Image (tube, rainbow, N blue to C red):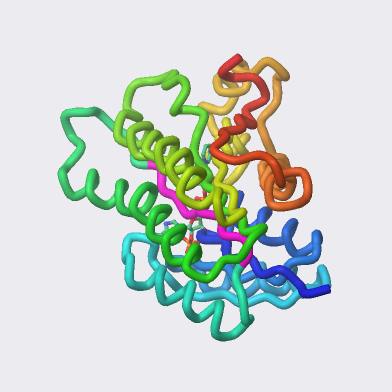
Amino acid sequence: MTRRVALVTGGSRGIGAAIAVRLAAEGADVVITYARSADRAAEVVGQIEAAGARGLAMAADSADAGALVAAVERTVAEFGRIDIVVSSAGIAPFGPLEEVTLAEVDNTLAIHARASFVLAQAAARHMGPGGRIICIGSSFVERVPYPGWTLYAMSKSALIGLTKGLARDLGPRGITANLVHPGSTDTEMNPADSPEAAEERRYTALDRYCSPDDIAATVAHLAGEGGRNITGAAITVDAGTTA
Ligand code: NDP
């Protein structure tokens, strides 16, 4: 059977790295992108290969639409196909509303919203039936529990419209589009041992942080057989924070 090929943005660390390794364990060859962490990305490629899959890391800043399109084209050129794309690259701009600059607005929207659109559009040109487009959003699109996150919440909310639109545009071709909203997840962006973590954990129903593997398991479900009839949907994996 032909192996499937996945491209995961922001795969050098955290949630993206866990998704990349999980998809490899499920039998896909996996390309990851990163912005700065070449060494960390190479380690993830080692884990992909240890799972018996072919792996490749590419530097591609998600703020650069041309670099993302080039990453898709190189994936197809080197692996022969593209079946799954996951937009996970992200940043966490935080601070007083009055201090947010226009440059920060543009950069955040570029990395979270525009990049997800560009990746989906570029990949869809090559995908056949069974293709999977998955974005990583945030539970903040359902509830913003603290001040200082307006820009972040706005940028992630755009993914809801993107996902529903893609589901309609690509459904006739047998391609699905879905969104996974993590809650507090133990990564360098939001360590489970930070001073704020105890409060974040208290907001959950299960009294626990998510691990990157929790998010990866849901992505793997959507990317596999279990996702065959799910499209235009958002699944929140937040230990019940928004319950
Ligand atoms: P990390 O900070 O741990 O990792 C971020 C990843 O994104 C790294 O691989 C990083 O690459 C990459 N990245 C950042 N900016 C760019 C860019 N401009 N171009 C390409 N790659 C980039 O974050 P998480 O793993 O925690 O977050 C992953 C996703 O999950 C994000 O979209 C985030 O918003 C979302 N999320 C996270 C939550 C959490 O609690 N952790 C909660 C809700 C959503 P490099 O190593 O090169 O910098």
* Residue 89 part of the magenta segment: yes
Quadrant including the N terminus = bottom right
Would residue 168 be found to the left or right of residue 243 on screen?
left
Q: Residue at x 42, y 60 (%)?
A: 121
Tell me residue 123's x, y (percent): 49, 65
Tell me residue 69's x, y (percent): 40, 71
The main secondary structure of the magenta stretch is loop
Q: Which residue lies most toward the front here?
A: 172
Quadrant including the C terminus = top right
Q: Which residue lies most toward the bottom here?
A: 78
Tell me residue 125's x, y (percent): 47, 68
Q: How many marks?
A: 0
Q: Residue at x 61, y 54 (%)?
A: 174
Foreground residue among 1 and 46: 1
* Residue 7 part of the magenta segment: no
Tell me residue 58's x, y (percent): 51, 75
Residue 150 seen from this side: yes
Foreground residue among 154 and 134: 134
Would residue 37 be found to the left or right of residue 185 on screen?
left
Q: Residue at x 47, y 78 (%)?
A: 73
From this view, report whether residue 19 is shown above or below residue 34.
above
Q: Residue at x 38, y 60 (%)?
A: 118
Residue 188 seen from this side: no
| Magenta extent | 83-92
Would residue 237 be found to the left or right of residue 146 on screen?
right
Would residue 213 be found to the left or right of residue 16 on screen?
right
